[in-house]
Image (cartoon, grey):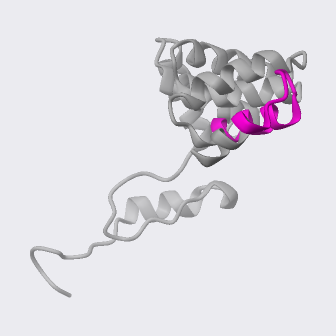
């Protein structure tokens, strides 16, 4: 074993923690990394605490955890609420995710017109996913007048 700078050490606490974690949520860290095991349930607790203090990044992250049922029971209706709070604070990822939920009618009444509005806001902030979704909506005339030329512009960004 090498001693001194660059020495690689195993962390018995981390190894035992990872062995105890459930297989689907376990993250294997390299022995020289310091950290904790992945725990999505605890992540939701911390995201919620920050989200309740109006942290838009946490609101968006909590929305995603709820939308996909990661670390918490799947709850798309609550996910939409958190996405909307973050989107209203100009979080581009939340704006795009809210647009997707509105376009699909996931836990909310389907509203393609509002979806286009949120896609547009996120697209102007260079969110590639929103630019693509906005292009699709424009190309197909969903929630907005059909405009293939403008759709191509968004696809090319």
Task: From the viewer's perspective, tell me whether residue 77 is left or right of residue 13.
Answer: right
Image quadrant in which you'd find residue 8: bottom left
Locate residue 114 relative to residue 48 in the image: left or right.
Answer: right
Q: Residue at left 74%, top 23%?
A: 116
Q: Total number of numbered labels?
A: 0
Picture layout, residue 111 above or below residue 73? above
In the picture provided, is 121 more to the left or to the right than 105?
left
* Residue sticking out furthest to the left: 4
Q: Any magenta on residue 34? A: no
Which of the two residues, 74 or 80, is positioned nearer the viewer here? 80
Tell me which segment is drawn in magenta: 130-150
In magenta stretch: residue 147: yes
* Residue 157, above or below 79: below
Query: The N terminus appears in which quarter of the rendering?
Result: bottom left
**Above or below for 64 versus 25:** above
Report whether residue 75 is seen: no
Residue sitting farthest toward the front: 149
Pick the residue in front: 18 or 71: 71
Image quarter of residue 138: top right
Residue at image location 54% in from the left, 60% down from the top: 27
Q: Nearer the viewer, residue 74 or 141?
A: 141
> Where is residue 3 drawn, in percent x and y?
12, 80
Q: Quadrant of the C terminus?
A: top right
In the rendered structure, the answer to whether residue 144 lies left or right of residue 94 reads right
Residue 4 visible in this rendered orientation of the protein = yes
Rendered view: 19 above or below 44: below
């Amino acid at each position: 074993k090498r001693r001194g700078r660059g020495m690689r050490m195993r962390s018995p606490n981390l190894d035992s923690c990872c062995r105890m974690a459930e297989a689907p949520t376990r993250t294997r860290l390299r022995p020289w990394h310091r950290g904790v095991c992945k725990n999505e349930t605890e992540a939701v607790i911390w995201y919620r605490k920050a989200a309740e203090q109006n942290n838009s990044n946490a609101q968006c992250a909590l929305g995603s955890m709820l939308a996909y049922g990661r670390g918490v029971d799947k709850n798309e209706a609550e996910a939409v609420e958190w996405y909307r709070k973050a989107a209203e604070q100009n979080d581009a990822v939340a704006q795009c995710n809210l647009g997707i939920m509105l376009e699909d009618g996931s836990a909310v009444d389907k509203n393609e017109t509002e979806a286009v509005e949120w896609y547009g806001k996120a697209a102007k902030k260079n969110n590639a996913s929103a630019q693509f979704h906005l292009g699709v909506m424009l190309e197909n005339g969903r929630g907005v007048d059909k405009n293939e030329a403008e759709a191509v512009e968004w696809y090319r960004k």
